[in-house]
Image (cartoon, grey):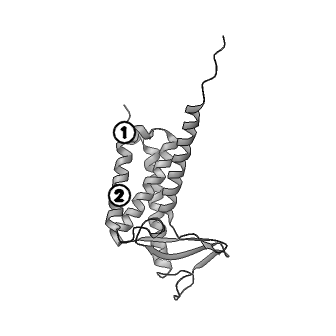
Amino acid sequence: MKSPLLAYRRLWSIAIVILVLDQATKLAIDGWLPLNTYHAYSGPQEPVEVIPGFFYIVHIVNKGAAWGIFAGYTQILALLGLVAIGAIFFFREALGLKRPFMQVAFGLLIGGIIGNMIDRLAYGHVVDFLDFHFGSYRYPAFNIADCGITIGVGLYLIATLLEGKQADTPPPASPK
């Protein structure tokens, strides 16, 4: 009989990689750029321009969730992350977590949730540093954990839509 932990080794491996990358990059940003190194602030240092007019490295904090919503509810957001992880494992059979593709999707998601949860509990905020501009539009800054969450949810939605299309397709007619 296969160990339950081994059955999800791909999920755990991806979650750990995302978590380590997320925490390492946030520590690097904390040590490299002063807080509030950002276009909207007049600080001692400008953001690092990686691709002129498009991609910058900044150092800001987010006390809320995506786009700063629910700012000031740090402990509640951390608790919601814990509830989400619990729900994923409670419903692991229904979610198909033994399938490799789903392990990738949920490994990304779980690694991101834990990365941001650590920040919220340890510091009361999340460090964001990836800043993209599309002409005059500036997308809200984000981090590696946010990438894991977004890509994980996107992969899950794609898998769900593809499975739905396959279920809607009638089986081929049998020869008579």
Disc 2 residue type (three-letter): Leu
Q: Quadrant of the N terminus?
A: top left
Residue 122 to residue 41: above or below: above
Badge 1 element = helix
Say which residue label 2 marks: 80
In percent of width and height, residue 94 lies at: 41, 38
Quadrant, the C terminus: top right
Q: Residue at x 48, y 81 (%)?
A: 36
Q: Which residue is more in the foreground, 10 or 141?
A: 141
Mark 2 or 1, which is nearer the eye? 2
Mark 2 vs mark 1: which is more N-terminal? 1
Q: Which element carries disc 2, helix, strand or loop?
A: helix
Mark 2 burial class by Cα count in 10 Å: few <14, some 14-19, many 20+ = some
149 on left or right of 75: right
- Amino acid of disc 1: Pro
Q: Position of residue 3 (x, y in %)?
A: 36, 37
Q: Residue furthest top?
A: 176
Residue denoted by label 1? 4
Name the spot of residue 5 as percent of width and height, x first.
37, 42
Residue depicted at 53% across the width and 88% down the height? 42
- Locate residue 14, reporting x and y percent: 48, 51
Q: Is residue 35 left or right of residue 124?
A: right
Residue drawn 46% across the image and 67% down it? 24
Q: Nearer the viewer, residue 159 or 11?
A: 159
Structural distance between the alpha carbons of marks 2 and 1: 25 Å
Q: Quadrant of residue 48?
A: bottom right
Residue pictured at 47% horizontal, 61% vertical: 145
Is the residue 51 above or below the residue 107 in the image? below
Are the residues tagged 2 and 1 within 8 Å (C-beta)?
no
